[in-house]
Image (tube, coloured by chain):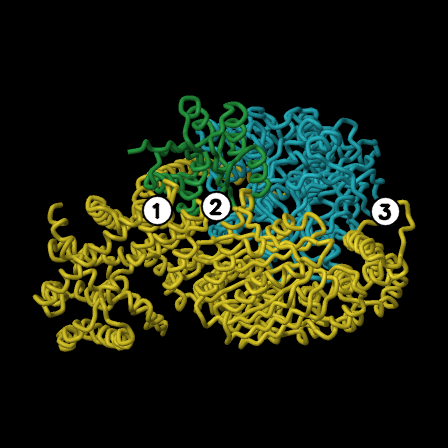
Chain colours: A green, B cyan, C yellow
Amino acid sequence: MEEKKQLLLAEDDELLASLLSYRLQKGGYEVSHMRDGKEVKEHLAENTPDIIVSDIMMPYFSGIELIDFVRNELGSKIPIIIISSAGNEENVLTAFELGANDFISKPVSPTELLVRVARELKKV
Amino acid sequence: MDNGIFEVILEYINIVFLLFTIVLFVLFTIMVYLSTRNSIHYRNKNSFGDLSKIMASPLAPSITIIAPAYNEEATIVENIRSLLSLQYVNYEVMVVNDGSKDDTLKKMIDSYDLEKIEQEIDPNWKSKPIRGIYKSKQLSFSKLTVIDKENGGKSDALNTGVQLSDNKYVGCIDVDCLLMPDALLHVVKSFYQRTQKRVIAVGGVIRVANSCKISGGMLEEIRLPTNWLARFQLLEYTRSFILGRMAWGRIDSLLIISGAFGFFDREIVMAVGGYDTNTVGEDMEIVFKMRKYMHDENLPYTVEYIPDPLCWTEVPEDLKILVNQRDRWARGNLETLQKHKDMFFNPKYGKLGLISYPYWFFYEWLAPLLEFVGFFSIIVFIYLGIINWDFFIAITTTIYMFSVMISFYAILWDVYSYNQYTKTKDLLTLVFCAIIEPLVFHPIVVFSAVRGNYKKLFRIKSGWGSQVRKGFAKV
Amino acid sequence: MSSPKIHTDLLWDLTCLFIGLGLLYFVLVFYFRNKISSKVKQVVLRKRELSPMISEFLFYEEDANKEEKSNYITLKIEIRELLKNDFNRKVLSEVLLDLQKDVSGNTETRLFKLYQDLGLHLDAYEKLKNWRWEIVSKGISDLTTMQVFDAYGFIIKFINDKRGVIRKQSEIAAVTLKNEGINYFLDTTKYKISQWQQLKMLEVIRNLENFEPPRFKAWLTSSNKDVVLFGLRLIKFYNQNDANTSIIQLIRHRNNNIKEEAINCIKKFCILEAIAPLKLVFWKCKTDIKILILDTIATLGDESDIPFLRMVEKKESNFVITSKVLSTINAIVPETILPTKGLEVVTKEDMVLEEEDVLVNETLDHKKDSPETNTLEKDNIEELAFAQESEIEEINLLEPEELHEETSTINATTEIDFLPHIIADNEEMVAIFQEPEMEEIKAPQAEVDSEENVTEIADEMSGILLEPSEFSKEIDTVTDSVEMDFLPHVIADNEETVAISQEPEMEETKEPEVEVDSEENVTEIVDDMSRILLEPDELSKEIDTVIDSVEMDFLPHIIDDNEEGFTIPQELEMEEIKVPEVKVDSEESFIEITDEINKVLLEPEEINFLPNVIEDSEEECIVIEELNIHTGPLNKSSINIFDNNFFEQDNYNKILLLDTLEDLGSAKELPFLKEIIEKEENLAIKERAMEILNDFSETNYSLNKESNVLENENLNEGNSIFKQLFDSSDEESKLVLLDQILEIGDNKEISFLKTLLNDENKAIRDKSKTVKTELEKRNQFEDMDNGTRDGNKEVELLFPLTPGDEMDFIQTIEYKATLSEEKTETKLIIDKKLIPLEFCFLLDKLDIKLPKPSSILDKDFTFTQEFYKSQEASYNPNKKKK
């Protein structure tokens, strides 16, 4: 059996997070769920996930900053998928500029997220 | 005999004073009642429904947010970014650089990749000359327009913005304000909700952002200000917005919309000729003017007020700046009342002339002066030994307790509606503020008001006064 | 002489009162703080507890293994237990309502199902009976958000409620819960409709699936001004151009909003006849309407409008209007007014002009035309440009002869954009938009022959399918230079829906006769397109004759609904292209179309196709978005399309396809899946296919087995399974059982019900009577249905159960199990189950008839019922273990 892919899910809305992580786990990923930017940062200091799925709006540390942190400070090329709220184009553009790989907008279809995650991982 | 008459006169002064106080109590009680009703109604009405779904609707109106900037180089870039990330599609952010002496314009040009564009301007429009209009070369900042003009004051800057905007609604805000992401949605809702009346303006609550944790243009943690002056102002704002304006909103007689967060129907603003550049109380004056215009034109209209915390701003923490600010408000108040004195008890203007205007006249303008005069007469009375101590102590205590009670009620209502300061320590601090406020903070306010009036009435030239921004704490 | 005495005691009393109140408030501050905080905490805790359960429910799949299944059932019981607590119910509905905002797609649908399965909608129904408006509104809003369609009947009663908030919520509910709700609303509403309300309602209908807008012109005569206004906005939004006369009338309306909207419609639909009336009303209008009118004249007007504009220029004092007039004049006759001031006048119109200048100049170089004709041509171009715009927006408006005239005045020198979209909807509607660039153009004759108006759908679809920005992005990628672009999109909504858009630029094109006949075959469009593409001999001959060949891009996008989107860009080089004769029919299967297209695409050498594999992620997003939009109802036959297209997809699309297949497919797909596993190189896809293969074969197997069990059982019992349960129940449970019979029963139950007609209890008698009639009705339907089928039950069973059915089923058995095993249990569950009965009362009281279950549902019932029984047998042992 192949080792499970590590997935970091950063989402402050607990409900949605638990739903998504459930679906992703079911889809065969090992999900670590972080509620805010601080936790993400701490987590990243010790772990290297295979892929990051992050909400764009989070307390302490926005998704944008997260991308910046991962790309510039960690210098890592881990694929990052951004979850954006509807209509927040500016942020999405900035996210792409900073090196996000993909985005999915709320309302999220968990199945679609799964597909996107799979696709990003395939590209690596 | 002489003495007797004098004593009778003194007694009558006391009675007048008592009556004034009782009227005040009654009015405040009515106000509390109205605001409570209105708050409950508002809560029930808006407890459901997802606003964000409509932000991209083809029917959603266009809005221009006009933010005048004067010497804001420290915070301008960050503030604009926050303005650009509101939850709405059809809006434009227009920053009017009012002839800043620092690098405000250069900072904007560099950060947002601006380039000068050409646009024809109505030669008849009487604002200070425009030096240039800038748009960003980058698509992601396409909502931003920067106007560089010669210094002409806040009103002049706002007028330029109103003139150059071609959207249905204009929002006049302070550039250093922090708007909640859903602010525009609430505003649009307020503008669009009415069926019978035209909504000509929408105002909102201003919340105190001092010491709050803000990053990336987002409010992350609400904290009680650490500065005492700011705490008093927080209490004052809570009282005025949660009780005062809510009550005025209930009877549709709201006369003031904060300059920090006010949205207007552009057509009406243009019709009344924009902001008055000769007053420092332009935010109050324009509402007077617009209301008057609608009355004159005999059109059904209303001014809406949103009690949800949508706009956060920093209040002065320095005593001198605070006094200057209040001084300015007092002058603005006086100027506005003066300019529209024909409305005083004028039944033609309905509630506006019969309730709102007199209220502003007596309780916003006259009361501080009376307090001031009263204070000195009491000192004189004490000196002359003719004071009725029984009465004096009784009425002072009553008024004092009443004002403390009102403050408590405001705190209570704030907790009940928004529950934003949850720590016991914070609440106790607020309560403590409420207890000492009449003794400590209120005299400062009265003093500033008197100074403002004195300056105005004796024509001592004074401008806007300056406020140095600390800039929101960065993480 | 003395003054009245002041009672200082009174003041002290007041002081005491204020102190008292102050203390009270002080206490209340902390009381409320604690109450709110603790409630928030509790809710958070409860949410944390409930949310994994919800995830479990939402993502439960039929193919779960035994352990999971039993786990699932325990969970079901657990949640039922939890739901007996009112607080839990509240939190749970809150959780579900919250989640609804954040999830979409399949999960959302399941969420709705779950909401109803857990009986939470009953709480919402309860709220409707409350006397407080905010609670009623909350109830309506809950039912709307969770799409409880049955609630429609209850809610529309409130549409003219005098309490504003209730009214507004029920209006939203009406349009959300039923596609025809908008008609009902517009017909019945007596109150004003606020702008906000219009906005929200448009948002709702925009997002309705399979919504077919009615002809909104019917409401332009309404006495309610807001209905008229809203009608106009909807007309504009759905591009219904059949109300032009009414619209022209409405520009005289006293209400400025209506006037404004009417002018907007005129501008959008290019109603040329409206110019004269517009000029008449101009003088009395307000500034912004004047500007709007000028804008419209700039778009639609011609030289005959210049005198009018000159007059406006002279008479108007308002700067904004005069400057607008000048730009309008310049838009109609370019460079009439030259910039005089130091400032450069840059308006949109000018920019357009400049671009066209460039174009003209280029062609001039090419064709060596005399400079004198230049200006004249520019004018022509402009007129044409306007004409084209109108064409794009409103094909029906287009007078072919007129365009013909205009075009023939051009001396083979200008380029014209021509962009055809062909979009067919499943209701046999087709519309064609074209924007080609050509040297010589003859009038495109669009013959639209369809029972209903076509344009509306066309625009709706183009609105949805091609987000303007995306579209322009696509165009941008194609039109980097002045080349000839040919860009057809074929977008199929479901089986019979086809949309084709093209943007050809041609040097010489003969009259494209696009005949769209709804009765004819859709396939022919593609067929004809392929003919264009497949006539290599002819084309190449022509191409050979060309020395300075002008490049022509041919880039059709074909996007099929069922998430198996595929994009095939191609490039063609040609100088001349023959007329595509396109005939469209929607009666015939879509598969043929795809086949055709595949055929076309599979022979690339012949015609020099250059299929680009889109690698840019942005573009992929577009495709994905389009795919997501098209998640309409799915059709069996379209599943076969999987086979045809699968191997042409890139990996991502393959996965998408497989996902869809998993959702829709049945054991029929087994051979195809095997084929994938054999041929596919990508490991992940292989695995995925394997997974699905296993799923399918398992279900297939288990279902077969279960149906056997079922038959045996039937032999043994031969009687209604309810009888036994019924005999051992008390009155309340009996009533509930009757509900169940109605839900899942079939013919066998009827005889049983007959016996109940003589029951001593009146309630049971009545209830069984209604149930019996309902059942009989349904069975008739079924019989008819079964008659048309081959009657093979196994085939029916092959269709996967929808999650909701599954839940119903588990609910049923769980219910039955508890019923027979424990009396106390039964009582508690019945308490909740009783509520439907109260509905019946409510129904009676309100005189509402519940919508009858559709025949589609009935089909489901046939097999699910049998499925239930078999499942019951296999599950009961499981339960006993617990």
Q: Quadrant of residue C349?
A: bottom right
Which residue appears at 63% of the width and 25% of the height? B317
From the viewer's perspective, is the residue at label 3 or at label 1 nearer? 3
Amino acid type at image mark 1: Val
2 and 3 marks on the same chain: no
Q: State whether residue B59 is above or below residue C406.
A: above
Q: Report in which chain the residue with disc 2 lies.
A: A
Quadrant location of the C terminus of chain C? Answer: top left
From the viewer's perspective, is the residue at label 2 or at label 3 nearer? 3
Dot 3: element: loop
* Residue at which label 3 appears: C344
Q: CA distance from mark 3 to mark 1?
A: 63 Å
* Residue A31 coordinates in the image, percent (x, y): 36, 34
* Residue at which label 2 appears: A106
Q: CA distance from mark 2 to mark 3?
A: 44 Å
Q: State whether residue C159 is above or below residue C805.
A: below
Which residue occupies the foreground of this view, C83 or C191? C83
Which residue occupies the foreground of this view, B239 or B200? B200
Which residue occupies the foreground of this view, C834 or A94? A94
* Residue at which label 1 appears: C91
Q: Report in which chain the residue with disc 1 lies.
A: C
* Residue B427 coordinates in the image, percent (x, y): 47, 31
